[in-house]
Amino acid sequence: MPEGLEAEIWRAAIEVTVGRTITDASVDERVAPPGFASIVRDLRITAVRRAGKVVLVDTDGPTIGLHFGMTGRVVVDGSAPIERLSYASGRDEAEWNRLCLWTGSTDQPPAVRFNDPRRFGHVSLDPDLSRLGPDMFVIKPSELHAVLARRRSAVKAALLDQHVVAGLGNLCVDELLWWAGIAPHRAGDDVTVEEVRRLIGVMRRRLRVMLRRGGSTTGVIDPRVRSELPDCPRDGAPLRRARIGSRTTVWCAAHQR
DNA sequence: CGGCATGTTTCGCC
DNA sequence: AGGCGAAACATGCC
């Protein structure tokens, strides 16, 4: 589930911890820098930000980075902002906890609990964000077009590249290209300024809608469908599926050109 | 059982 | 140097 939209939902949820002090921490040391727990203990949380798909917990010491990988998720004060991973069972096993931050008694649920069955996620201190592109909510058409103009491979692959635009994942990219009417296999340098303008407009509107609805699984196009694909909700043409940019991709060959 | 998974990093090749 | 594709990572699900 975690793309930039999920990170934003979790960022907003974790914001309730601003002003609190971390009283205790437990981590899976395989996914954290050495000494992580003792470093963050007694730090005061001052702000919660997002950079692309990363949630940043600012403190009066180092910034804590939450990197969700494919299956990471967050529970705040015992309640989950997003109920379950929609391609997983919804189980929530204690052995999958990778980080717990308490801001009071350890008898209470942790203020922040990072749970990740697959362990592709990790936590960091003062993460290097210098190689992230402009955020998906604020990137400008001129910026995106300039980068796409140097790409000969599929526009979908470019949009998934976090150096190009930060925050988009496989689900959102298929959704946005569907709305923009752009075929995912088109070469990046073949996409016109006009099309990039249209795509950015779609991004701003549709990402906002999906955020309000609960994240990247709430669009109309779903590349996760394994069996027979439905027809295109816009024009009734059969949706197509292929591997583009090394990812499963779904698009409508009728209106995405 | 085999294949697939919403992500990132690394490696080898151009 | 930087774009590109494939492989690897670890684990659960269908």
Image: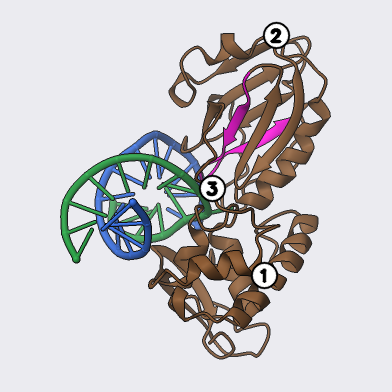
Chain colours: A brown, B green, C blue
Front-lying residue, A17 or A83: A17
- Disc 3 element: loop
Q: CA distance from mark 1 to mark 3?
A: 18 Å
Label annotation for residue A200:
1
Asked if residue A167 is among those painted magenta in the image, a careful observer would answer: no
Q: Residue at x 55, y 82 (%)?
A: A192
Front-lying residue, A19 or A129: A129
- Magenta residues, start to end: A62-76
Label annotation for residue A42:
2
Reading the chain from its start, which is encountered first: label 2 or label 1? 2
For the residues tagged 2 and 3, is the chain the same?
A: yes
Q: Is residue A200 left or right of residue A245?
A: right
Q: CA distance from mark 2 to mark 3?
A: 30 Å
Q: Position of residue A123 (x, y in %)?
A: 54, 29
Q: Is residue C6 above or below residue A70?
A: below
- Indicate the amino acid at tag 1: Ile
Label annotation for residue A79:
none
- Residue located beneath label 3 in the image: A132
- Indicate the amino acid at tag 2: Asp
Q: Position of residue A241 (x, y in %)?
A: 46, 76
Q: Position of residue A173 (x, y in %)?
A: 57, 65
- Mark 2 in CB contact with mark 1 (< 8 angstroms): no
Q: Is residue A108 above or below residue A116?
A: above
User: Crowding at label 3, few (<14), some or many (≥20) Cα neighbours within 10 Å?
Assistant: some
- Disc 1 element: helix
Q: Residue at x 49, y 69 (%)?
A: A148
Reading the chain from its start, which is encountered first: label 1 or label 3? 3
